[in-house]
Image: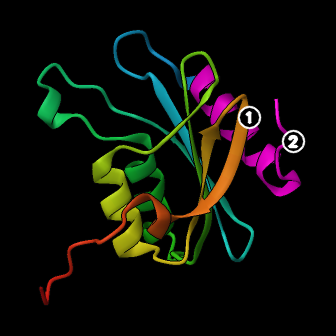
Amino acid sequence: MTDRPSDAESLIEAARAMLASRRRSGRHYVGAALRTGAGRVFSAVNLGATVGRASVCAEAIALGMAAAAGDTDVDLVVAVNERGAVVSPCGLCRENLSDFAPAARVIVPEGEGVAVVPIAALLPNKFAKGD
């Protein structure tokens, strides 16, 4: 496993802890955590719904929690699956993060370890309202 950036390790653990403590089989299978520039951490689980389109991703919920707290200067984001492995954000989360936190960095899987990349790297040639 490659070395994890030291500032990422605690955020990965926060996402894992959230999922471990709140997981409900068939409903919560992803945990996410984000850290703002002020150092606040917001953690959440996904909301899996019977009708898949009604499901809400953990990253989106964490982002909404930060927005509700008035702290949307998102610095770093991570999501983990039921096994605790870091996973990449889905396309919708990439869109949300790039819209609401364009300077955010995202922890993603890379080989046997993880990497920290700018959200823009995960959504090249992003659609803009003016396009």
Q: Secondary structure at mark 2?
A: loop
Say whether disc 1 or disc 2 marks the residue closer to the N-terminus. 2
Where, quadrant-wise, is the C terminus in this rendering?
bottom left
Kind of residue at badge 1: Gly
Residue 92 in the magenta stretch? The answer is no
Q: In terms of secondary structure, where does tag 1 sit?
A: strand
Identify the colour scheme used: rainbow
Mark 1 highlights which residue?
A: 113
Q: Residue at x 57, y 27 (%)?
A: 19
The residues colored magenta run: 1-21
Residue 7 is inside the magenta segment: yes
Amino acid under disc 2: Asp
Q: What is the magenta segment's predominant secondary structure?
A: helix
Tell me residue 53's x, y (percent).
13, 35
User: Looking at the rendered structure, which numbered label has been put on residue 3?
Assistant: 2
Measured in 3D between alpha carbons, the distance from the residue under mark 1 to the one under mark 2, in whole angstroms, is 7 Å
Residue 95 placement, left or right of 111: left
Q: At which x and y percent is residue 130?
A: 13, 90
Q: Residue at x 67, y 56 (%)?
A: 116
The answer to whether the residues at label 1 and label 2 have Cβ atoms under 8 Å apart is yes
Q: Is residue 28 left or right of residue 40?
A: left
Q: Nearer the viewer, residue 131 or 73?
A: 131
- Residue at the image position 51 percent from the left and 19 percent from the top: 23
Name the spot of residue 46 as percent of width and height, x first: 40, 34
Above/below status of 126 relative to 14: below
